[in-house]
Amino acid sequence: MYIQQIEYVKLINSMALSHAILAALLGGSCSGYDLCKRFEGSVGFFWQASFQQIYRELNKLEEQGLLTSNTVRQQNRPEKKIYQVTAAGRDYLQAWIVEPCDLPPIRDELLVKVFAGYLVSPSLLVAELERHRTQHQQRLAVYREIEQQFFSNPESFSIEQKFRYLTLRNGINYELGWLAWCEEAIATLNPTD
């Protein structure tokens, strides 16, 4: 039973990564390296994957006929493959998009620490909460910069831009929610401030 659960989790993770890769490639054909960079600046904000995982998944998607690649020769550099989504890949992604999805499981180390935080001095957790607050402020600043640079005029968005903007807005609201919770948690644990 346990092994079946592990295989199921691997399948789910693999399926989600394949969809994230196909979604990132909709922006245009590119090499695996360029896809990894594109992934970091788009889908990677809400779906994490290493370069190794992406390259492995690219090979699987190509074997399944969901991607094709062309090899490009380069002077004084190794050959590179340029990947693009096939019609079957687009159909596969469209079918997946209309499937209902469940709430994702939450796995948050900080929340487990806070849950059992009474075992240590509150000041130790306040320091950790302040560190997380800084990280969320930095991520929010990145999202705000993206919003200002690429999404400053929502009234003129194409349909593609509207959908991408919605994912950005979710990220902004997510960070704002975390920041509000961090402030509340710090004030609760540090009532003298």
Image (spheres, rainbow, N blue to C red):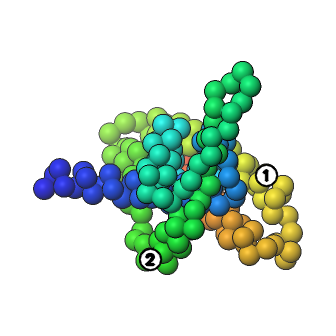
Residue 21 lies, in percent from the top left, at 55, 54
Mark 2 — residue?
99
Residue 139 lies, in percent from the top left, at 66, 48
Bin the neighbour count of mark 2 within 10 Å (Cα to Cα): few under 14, some 14-19, many 20 and up: few
Residue 159 in which image quadrant: bottom right
Nearer-the-camera pick, 134 or 18: 18
Q: What residue type is labelled 1?
A: Glu
Residue 164 visible in this rendered orientation of the protein? yes
Bin the neighbour count of mark 1 within 10 Å (Cα to Cα): few under 14, some 14-19, many 20 and up: few
Q: Quadrant of the N terminus?
A: bottom left
Residue 10 lies, in percent from the top left, at 32, 51
Q: Residue placed at 25% from the left, 52% from the top?
A: 7
Label 1 close to label 2 by CB (< 8 Å): no
Residue 79 lies, in percent from the top left, at 63, 32
Q: Residue placed at 68% from the left, 71% from the top?
A: 163
Mark 1 — residue?
145
Residue sticking out furthest to the left: 1
